Image (cartoon, rainbow, N blue to C red):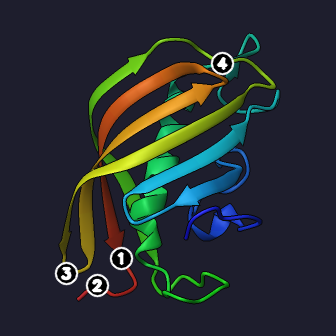
Amino acid sequence: MDSINNVDIRKYLPHRDSMLMVDRLLNLTKDFVKTEFLIKGDNVFIKNNTFIESGLIENIAQTCSIIAGSSYFNEGDERLENKSQVIGYISAIKTVEIYELPRVNDLLVSQGTMVSRFDFENYLTCTMKGQIFCGDKVLLECLLNLFIKDIQHEG
């Protein structure tokens, strides 16, 4: 699924307006994801025209969760219909370095790489390496654990 265009990002993420921190999916493979997000002035994570730290962490968590969440979609279905009902959490932030905070109207390009993944029955846990860029500047680098559970198919 490389170079994804015009995919409704809400098919991959349960978040909705005011908490959706990803606008567009640029690339998705089984172990890499790249997204875009335009920071608007009415964003809940804006303070004094600056996108605060918790907004950056939410953006990278949503970006990274797209990889894990994509395994719950029907393969080959162009509409990307979700075959499960899933919930996900950040289970640990192992490391995070924030170098600079972006401002309103900045375009973030975020990417996540799967470091490890463990699937068991109706859940999975994974470790992801994430980075957020604004232009040629690296704003954030992190290593985080995600936990995703399929609540529709619980035993």
Measured Cα–Cα span from mark 2 to mark 1: 7 Å
Q: Could you tell whether 97 is left or right of 122 in the image?
A: right
Secondary element type, mark 2: loop
Dot label at residue 150? 1
Residue 53 against residue 71 in the figure, above or below: above
Q: Could you tell whether 105 is left or right of 69 in the image?
A: right
CB under 8 Å between discs 2 and 4: no
Please name whichever residue, 45 or 79, is drawn nearer the observer in this view of the structure: 79
Label 4 environment density (alpha carbons within 10 Å; few <14, some 14–19, many ≥20): many
Please name whichever residue, 1 or 143, is drawn nearer the observer in this view of the structure: 1
Residue linked to disc 3: 121
Q: Could you tell whether 113 is left or right of 24 in the image?
A: left
Measured Cα–Cα span from mark 3 to mark 4: 40 Å
* Amino acid type assigned to the residue bearing label 4 in the image: Pro
* Amino acid type assigned to the residue bearing label 3 in the image: Glu
| Residue visible at 44% across and 50% down in the picture | 64
CB under 8 Å between discs 2 and 1: yes
Dot label at residue 47? none
Name which of mark 2 and mark 4 comes first in the sequence.
4
- Depth check, mark 4 against mark 1: the one in front is 4
Measured Cα–Cα span from mark 3 to mark 1: 9 Å
| Residue visible at 78% across and 22% down in the picture | 104
Name which of mark 3 and mark 2 comes first in the sequence.
3
Q: Position of residue 141 (x, y in %)?
A: 40, 26
Label 2 environment density (alpha carbons within 10 Å; few <14, some 14–19, many ≥20): few
